[in-house]
Amino acid sequence: MADNREQIEYWNGDAGNTWVEAQDRLDAMLAPISAALLERAAVTAGERVVDVGCGCGDTSIELARRGAHVWGIDISEPMLARANERGSGIKNLAFSHKDAATADFTPDHTLLFSRFGVMFFADPPAAFQNMRSALTADGRLAFVCWQAPRENPWVAIAGRAVQPFLPEPEVEPDPKAPGPFAFADADYVRGILDAAGYGAIELEPFRTTLHLADSLDDAIAFQGKVGPLSRALADLEGQQRADALAAAREALAGHVTDNGLDLGAACWIVTARRD
C-alpha cells in the first residue's frame, strides 16, 4: 500500500481549514452534482452507507435525512469537526477520522458513496479493494469524479491564464497522480475498479453549470483560496502572484453576467457492484 501521508498533511493544514470556512458556499456550488449523484445512488431507508471523503458532512447529512444509517469518514480533522457540528443530534449519522485506504471495515454496508472524495489515493486499486471489504455480497458503489480540466471551464479558464506564470516542472506531471482530476480517464477508472473486485462498472457523463460567484471580484477572491487554482497560486509570490491573478481576472471577465459567474462543469458519475 502506497503512503497517503502527503494528502493527509495537505487536508489537515490550510486546505482543510479553508474548506471549512467556505463550506456553505461550496455545498451550494456543488448542489447540482450532489443531487445527480444522490439520485443515481438511490439510497433507501435502513441502508448502511459509508460516505468516503465526507468532508464537512453535506452528503452524509442528506443520506441520513433519506433514512440511511450513515458513517462519514475523512482524513481531514478540521472538516470532520465541522461535520460533527452540523450533524449533532442526528441519530443515524456518525463521523470518524479514518483513511478509507487502510481503515478496518466490516462487510455489512450496502453502499459506498463519495462526492469527489476518492481521487486522492496513492494506490487506488488497493484503496478500492480495501473499501470493498465494507460491502455486503450485493453491495454497490456510487461516486462522482471530475472529467479532464479541459472539459471543466470553471477551472480551465483561469488555469490557462495563470499557466505562463508558473515555474516549469522538473518532470512532466503525472495526470493520474492523486488530485482532483486523477480520475479523468474513464478507462483508467474502469481498470482500477475491475482490479479491485467490482463488476457492473458504469461511468455516466454528467454536465452542469456551477455558480462560482456573484461578481468578478468575488470570483477571484474565491478561486484564489479554494480549488485547483489556489494550488497553482501557492507556488507564486509577490508580483508574480499579482500578475497571475490579474491574468485570471482578465480571462474570467468576459464570462460574468448580471447573475454573476456561471461556468460549465463535467463529471463522471461512477457506479459498480461488488463482484
Image (cartoon, rainbow, N blue to C red):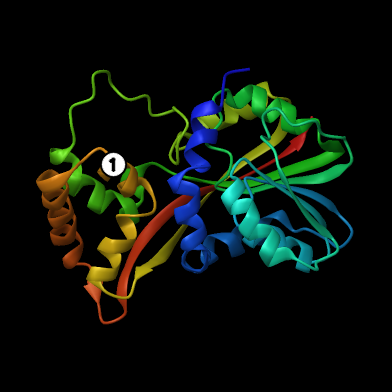
Pick whichever, 269 or 13, lies toward us.
13
Q: Residues within 10 Å of mark 1 (few under 14, many from 20)?
A: some
Q: How many numbered badges does the structure rendering display?
A: 1
Is residue 65 left or right of 193 when viewed as pictured?
right
Image spot of residue 16 (x, y percent): 50, 49
Q: Is residue 55 visible?
A: no
Farthest residue, direction bottom: 258
**Which residue is rendered at x = 33% and y = 61% of the image?**
222
According to the picture, the residue beneath numbered tag 1 turns out to be 232
On screen, residue 100 above or below 74: above
Q: Amino acid at mark 1?
A: Ala
On screen, residue 122 above or below 256: above
Query: Dividing the image into 4 quarters, which one contains the N terminus?
Result: top right
Quarter where residue 177 is shown: top left
Is residue 143 left or right of 148 when viewed as pictured?
right
Image spot of residue 24 (x, y percent): 52, 68
Q: Is residue 59 visible?
A: yes
Is residue 79 left or right of 17 when viewed as pictured?
right
**Which residue is rendered at x = 24% and y = 53% of the image?**
157
Pick whichever, 150 or 1, lies toward us.
1
Pick whichever, 101 or 189, lies toward us.
101
**Which residue is rendered at x = 56% and y = 30% of the image?**
121
Element type at mark 1 = helix
Image spot of residue 30 (x, y percent): 50, 62
Quarter where residue 263 is shown: bottom left
On screen, residue 165 above or below 72: above
Image spot of residue 203 (x, y percent): 57, 42
